[in-house]
Amino acid sequence: MASGSADNPLLRVLRGERLDPPPVWMMRQAGRYLPEYRALRQEKGGFLELVYDGNAAAEITLQPLRRFPQLDAAILFSDILIVPYALGQDLTFVAGEGPRLSPPLLGAPLDGLTAAPERLQPIYDTVAKVKAQLTPRKTLIGFAGAPWTVATYMIAGQGSRDQADSRALAYLDPTRFGRIIDAIADMTVDYLSGQIQAGAECVQLFDSWAGSLSPEQFERWVIAPTSRIVAAFKTRHPGIPVIGFPKGAGGKLPAYAEQTGIDAVGIDETVDPVWASRALPNGMPVQGNLDPLALLTGGEALGDAVQRVLDAFADRPHIFNLGHGIIKETPIAHVETLMQLVKGR
Ligand SMILES: Cc1c2[nH]c(c1CCC(=O)O)Cc1[nH]c(c(CCC(=O)O)c1C)Cc1[nH]c(c(CCC(=O)O)c1C)Cc1[nH]c(c(C)c1CCC(=O)O)C2
């Protein structure tokens, strides 16, 4: 099933080739910094309405590629919190406040939820719609949240600054916490697999809160469940690349890269790319790590920051990306400049 990567830059790099210029995409490239996204969101009412409208979601997935022809990949427009929704929690997005999941698992048992895997089906339809409209040179990236990050939302019922409730539960009742992690991991394997069957060509696991765990807890709740997901996924889809993005992992990145079975590792903007290039396994593709604030700011600082990233990864397979999602106030003109800086005029 390792479909033709011959003329597809992102897949070539994910399979270990170095390309100059590198392929480029941006985390959160479909979203609020684009006026065409804001217009559709206004029209359809809310974020979840967009995700569950296949035509709208496919259109939003493709919007950034229409505007920036240099982009090498489309990332499915959806959200990591669709998995908790499929596990039976209610999901809403409160304007200006972010996501809410109920009941929060801090006060309610997991087995009180009724799994609803049919809530994933519309997402696969979106994937198929996007795939049908993409040229073979552009890669379609599927994604899911990693169990630790998803668990922090399920337990608190919303985003939380330091994930304290989840970290405490993990110490207090590791058996109960482990059951939550396992339920997320199982659903995630099905979810990623469904995206591949529908036409996605690689997947990324977002572990946005990996940075809040102590080394032992990181081992137990980031590395171990990620390894299980990757192993199960690879059994179903041998040869399909997995990108792992453990945001904030810092010095724990080499262990993550070596032990989880992922094919490529995403690094955030706090990681020194020169260190990362030396410390990460030889030949492993690295994705990152322009500071989203440099992109927001633009000007000379942006040019310098882009060059530092390109230089640091000159000797290994590299996928140019931001260290985290694009900030919604980022001017379109700065993204155009970034594309020219990475790809040459
Ligand atoms: C933690 C997390 C979430 N979602 C995601 C993460 C992990 C990555 C990260 O750390 O940024 C991942 C995500 N969310 C979204 C995508 C789509 C694809 C893409 O990257 O372009 C992806 C990959 C769309 C979205 N997901 C969300 C929006 C904004 C919706 C809107 O207001 O229009 C988009 C475009 C909403 C969302 N979704 C989530 C939050 C906390 C919020 C509200 C805060 C915010 O608005 O940024 C959970």
Image (cartoon, grey):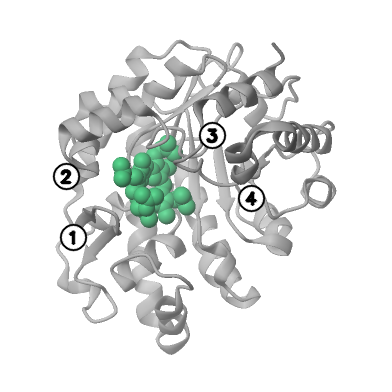
- 10 Å neighbourhood of mark 1: few (<14), some, or many (≥20)? many
Q: CA distance from mark 3 to mark 2?
A: 29 Å
Q: CA distance from mark 4 to mark 3?
A: 12 Å
Q: Nearer the viewer, mark 1 or mark 4?
A: 4
- Tag 2: residue type? Glu
Q: Is residue 16 visible?
A: yes
Q: CA distance from mark 1 to mark 4?
A: 32 Å
Residue indicated by mark 3: 26
Q: Earlier in the sequence, mark 4 or mark 2?
A: 2
As helix, strand or loop, the secondary structure at mark 3 comes to: loop
**Label annotation for residue 268:** 4
Horizontal and vertical percent position of residue 287: 65, 39
Q: CA distance from mark 1 to mark 2?
A: 11 Å
- Tag 1: residue type? Gly
- 10 Å neighbourhood of mark 4: few (<14), some, or many (≥20)? many
Q: Earlier in the sequence, mark 3 or mark 2?
A: 3
Residue indicated by mark 1: 88
As helix, strand or loop, the secondary structure at mark 1 comes to: loop
Query: How many marks on residues?
Result: 4
Mark 3, ligand 1, within 8 Å: the answer is yes
